[in-house]
Image: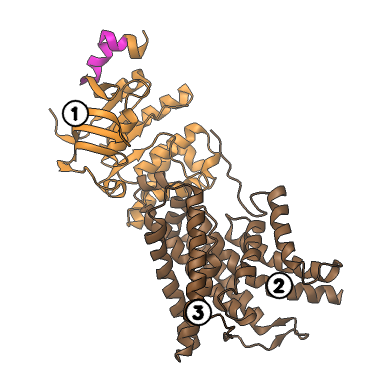
Chain colours: A orange, B brown
Amino acid sequence: MAEMLLETDQLCAFYGVTQVLFGLDLGVAAGGVTTLLGANGAGKTTTLRAVSGMVRTTGDIRFEGQSICGRATEDIVRLRIAHVPQGRGTFVRQTVEENLQIGAMIRHDRAGISRDIDRAYAYFPRLKECRLQQAGTLSGGEQQMLAVARALMLRPKLILLDEPSFGLAPLIVQELFAILRTLNRDEKVSMLVVEQNASLALDLADNAYLIETGELVMRGAARDLRNDENIRRAYLGY
Amino acid sequence: MDLLLHQVLAGLATGGIYACLALAIVMIYQAIDHLNFAQGEMATFSTFIAWQLIQWGVPYWVAFFAAIGVSFVAGVALERVLFRPIHDAPVLSHVVIFIALFAILNSLAGFLWDYNVKSFPTPFGSRSLFGGGLMSAHDGGMIGVTIFMLILLYLFFRHTRIGLAMRAAAANPESARLTGIRVGWMIALGWGMAAAIGAVAGMLIAPVVFLEPNMMSSILLYGFAGAVVGGLTSPGGAVLGGFAVGVIENLAGTFIPYVGRELKLTIALFIIVAVLTVKPSGIFGRTVVSRV
């Protein structure tokens, strides 16, 4: 197996006293794309929030072999783990370009930042057209692109994507996932993608996990899961 | 016409006081989304610190900047010690602490420096500008300093990275943390800046209304009125609102019969209610545009 960038070991997560995750062992290979499938409320979002240190957890999370369990969100971001949250996390009153600047807040290389803003515009030309517009006025698709672009400003080693296709028109989704594929191939950014749209996610990913009510029920290569009878019926709908 | 002009001028002079305080109010509102009722007492306390330094023989400008520095640190400390732990608590918890802070600072100032009215020096002198004694050099200086602070704030928030980080932290704390911004410290910084601006406001107001623990009690209401008129999300609007309230108050007192001195405070309340009814976000406040 390839070298693991992110690994969780018996990961449990809690909201208050309610336990949401029950001992997950997950892994994202360096340079790979892993997807996390499951129904509503299965704990997909919570898994991402656990990696970012936004929920109480037990068990262990290792990034590049180092335990990041119990670290503050702000410090985990500094390890170059970008998190594109559910709902996109747009700074609606700030301009598009300010949103990108915010994404690079932990960096101090001015020239590099402005190069990366140009790079983000190259990936998402539509953002360049409205770079001085209030981000709140963008369409849902544009805001999702902005969220990915903002994550890129971190120069991440790993991007956590929470339902990137949510609420978007099919054409926009196609475009977005094509860009994600390019990013993974050309920039060697690893990804952990949470998706409701299993078909889409399995196309992008090389590894997949299926969770149900906080427990792992299946793991394997994306192509194997795609051909699995049960998955097909329950999540792909054909 | 002459009378009108003179009253407008005099209104601008008092408006400068309100504008100064309104600016401090908006600063904290931006950082924590709450109105700080203790803002006036914090400013009074800072002014007492400067007064004490001057009594000890410290030169005016040294005392001026020392008071600003102390207030900044105290503002940051207040946030860290008092407000950090109740960060996620409901609005009412904040209100209770604001009121407690108000009472504590007020009586502490009275305890340390007693309730006798003290005069506070002005660095601008008190000779009259434009003749007629409607606007003194101090009033002019106060307006100048307020506008200067406003420009500094504008440059800070628009053109520095830390200013952008503060705006991001205030607008969307969770998303800001995910970009690595240390949101807690940004809020503390907002408190420090608001306390520092309040200190400047207090030291500029004290020569006019004289220094005593309750000197802000009526002014704070006008400051709130100014902030609400201009919009709690807009520092520039708050300053303009402050001036507007000063001018309106003065003109109403002169031209509307029966208003006079006694009903002046009512005008501030009237303005607050009227603005909240007609345009809740204030004249320059931004209504967030969003599309889903």
Chain letter behind tag 3 = B
Q: What is the magenta segment's predominant secondary structure? A: helix
Separation of residues labelled 2 and 1 (CA atoms): 68 Å
Classify residue A11 by image quadrant: top left
In this rendering, the answer to whether B86 lies above or below A10 is below
Residue position for label 1: A25
Amino acid type at mark 2: Leu
Image point (62%, 52%), residue name: B285
Chain at numbered mark 1: A
Residue marked by disc 2 = B12
Range of magenta residues: A219-232
Q: Which amino acid does label 3 sit on?
A: Phe
Which residue is at 71% across, 72% downward? Answer: B12
In depth, the one of A128 and A217 nearer the eye is A217
Q: How many marks?
A: 3
- Residue B154 position, x and y percent, is 53, 63
Answer few, some or many: residues within 10 Å of disc 3's Cα (few below 14, many 20 plus, some between 14 and 19). Answer: many
Q: Is mark 3 on a helix, strand or loop?
A: helix
- What kind of residue is marked 1? Asp
- The answer to whether A81 appears left or right of B14 in the picture is left
Instruction: Classify B95 as above or below A192.
Output: below
